[in-house]
Image (cartoon, rainbow, N blue to C red):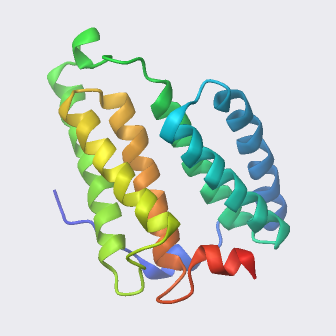
């Protein structure tokens, strides 16, 4: 498989207009509101923190950033919904599906790691720390063959790494939101 490359020009180009991002944020908030009732512990705290950051971003007019934060919260929410002990052994995963899952998981993990290694990516703070924990949880879920949970967490980690990398050396997202 070819190595994953970060396309800086593609990352910087806006995909949606502000109105579209506002609508998407509203939809994410509605889904998270439904899912959040079943959360507890660390996943509840992580989702609540991401929602709070997203609401501040919305108030500051950064709807695209809010959407990414809310999409991350949604992935964590879905990962937390996986029943304890649920793994690939509960369903039959054919060889072709197993290979596709492995390729997607590896791609997401590599993407997160590459973004975290960027010079502009902060090493500490709310988002980088959450990204590190989410990467660890994703790897543990994958090792347990809880592939659905692992993929949701890997997607969340890739989004978190991307958000952290976008904010620059000393300009953390939390600082920008607070200002």
Q: Position of residue 62 (x, y in %)?
A: 75, 71
Residue lying at 84% horizontally and 61% vertically, measured from the top left: 19
User: Residue 125, how many percent across, how many down?
Assistant: 48, 71
Q: Please state, as top left, top right, bottom left or bottom right, where the C terminus lies in the image.
A: bottom right
Q: Is residue 111 above or below residue 117?
A: above
Which residue occupies the foreground of this view, 118 or 37?
37
Q: Is residue 108 above or below residue 78?
A: below
105 on left or right of 62: left
Vertical relation: 178 (above or below) 158: below
Whether residue 65 is situated above or below residue 123 in the rendered picture? above
Q: Is residue 107 left or right of residue 27?
A: left
Residue at x 19%, y 19% (from the top left corner): 94
Q: Residue at x 80, y 64 (%)?
A: 58
Q: Is residue 91 visible?
A: no
Where does the image place residue 169, in percent across and percent down from the top left?
Answer: 46, 89
Rendering coords of residue 55 (x, y %): 77, 58
Quarter of the image where the N terminus is located: bottom left
Residue at image position (60%, 75%) is 173
């Amino acid at each position: 498989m070819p190595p994953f490359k970060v396309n800086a020009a593609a990352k910087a180009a806006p995909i949606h207009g502000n109105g579209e991002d506002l609508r998407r944020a509203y939809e994410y908030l509605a889904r998270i509101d439904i899912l959040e009732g079943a959360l507890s512990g660390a996943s509840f705290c992580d989702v609540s923190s991401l929602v709070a950051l997203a609401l501040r971003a919305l108030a500051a007019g950064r709807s695209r950033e809010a959407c990414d934060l809310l999409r991350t919260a949604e992935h964590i929410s879905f990962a937390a919904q996986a029943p304890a002990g649920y793994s690939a052994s509960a369903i039959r995963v054919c060889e072709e599906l197993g290979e596709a899952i492995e390729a997607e998981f590896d791609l997401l993990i590599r993407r997160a790691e590459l973004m975290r290694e960027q010079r502009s990516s902060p090493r500490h703070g709310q988002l980088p720390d959450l990204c590190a924990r989410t990467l660890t949880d994703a790897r543990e879920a994958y090792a347990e063959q809880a592939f659905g949970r692992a993929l949701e967490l890997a997607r969340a980690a890739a989004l978190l790494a991307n958000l952290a990398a976008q904010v620059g050396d000393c300009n953390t997202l939390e600082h920008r939101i607070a200002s």
